[in-house]
Image (cartoon, rainbow, N blue to C red):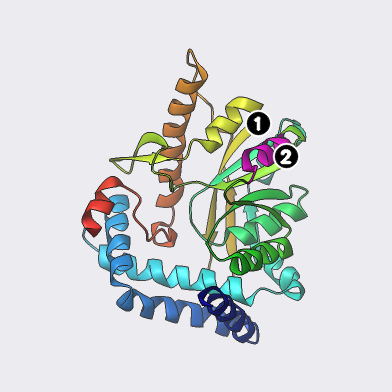
Amino acid sequence: MRQAIGYYIYRILSGLLGLLPEPVMRRLGYSVGWLTSFVARRRFAMAVRHQTRVAGTAVGAHRAARRVFMWYGRYWAEVFWMRPRRRRHVLSTTELAGIEILLGAVAAGKGVIVALPHMGNWEAAGLRAATEGARVLAVAEELGNERIVQWFVAMRHMMDIDIVVARKGARVTRELLQRLEQGGVVALVCDRDLSRRGIPVTFFGEQTTLPPGPLALAERTGAALLPVGTYFGRGARHRFVVHPPLEIPAAADAEERVRLGTQLLAEKFEEVIRVAPEQWHLILPNWPSDHEAER
């Protein structure tokens, strides 16, 4: 029953927001996000912690955290507003910097791994990549509600993004490897380690872990690993920035190369996030001290 209610809430929100003109939808997203920051106090406190880390000071962190929620509200509004007939509009709002890097990596034929933090609207980035001939396969979290999972899968298919769901028993790694071995593109949003058993890194000056997947896949297949920043722009605009391939350090064994490479990816994510830190809509614990602070 609860799963059905959750699913129909998504459908109702999608139906209502889908009726709105884009500017109204966007402003509503900002407003609902801002209001949510006053209600979701634990999540707001976590956003303050993260913004303090990024800036290196608590000065201005509360104001920045309010804006985190505003940008996150816009993201969700765009997700619910999207329809097949609006694909052309979304594409008209996108700018892709570094397209030659992406297409060059695809042309090399060894596969491409796109690594992103939780910023901007990465689904819009997937749509733009597909129109450039680089359709991506992405991993979706298992949310505990199959109907909502399938709603997300359908939405991302609408954006020309192929999906493998990380549910128990799923052969996620096999599907990712198969896509890379075919010379395709895999996209991983990987600035948060859900297992908390990943690779130890220093991230914004504090020890945490990141998922080993991006570097492990690159090490195993020889695929190029491209850090990408996805940003909201002025008005309805979106800007996506593809960075040069991450150079995996030389080391005696694969495990050490993955460890060193994951630290380099953390440092690159710092650079990507600092371009627009208030658009980094990570509002859940991401460092061991965050979990301690929530107790």
Q: Which x, y percent locates residue 161?
A: 70, 56
Q: Which x, y percent locates residue 235?
A: 55, 73
Label 1: which secondary element? loop
Label 2: which secondary element? helix
Dot 1 corresponds to which residue? 223
Quadrant in the rendering for residue 259? top left
The quadrant of the rendering that contains the C terminus is bottom left
Q: CA distance from mark 2 to mark 1?
A: 11 Å
Tell me what residue is drawn at x 76 percent, y 75 percent.
85
**Mark 2 or 1 closer to N-term?**
2
Dot 2 corresponds to which residue? 179
- Residue 191 at least partly seen: yes
Q: Amino acid at mark 2?
A: Arg
Asked if residue 118 lies left or right of residue 91, the reply is left
Tell me what residue is drawn at x 55 percent, y 56 percent.
142
Residue 76 against residue 125 in the figure, above or below: below
Q: Is residue 177 magenta?
A: yes
Residue span colored magenta: 170-180
Q: Which x, y percent locates residue 27?
A: 50, 81
Quadrant in the rendering for residue 104? top right
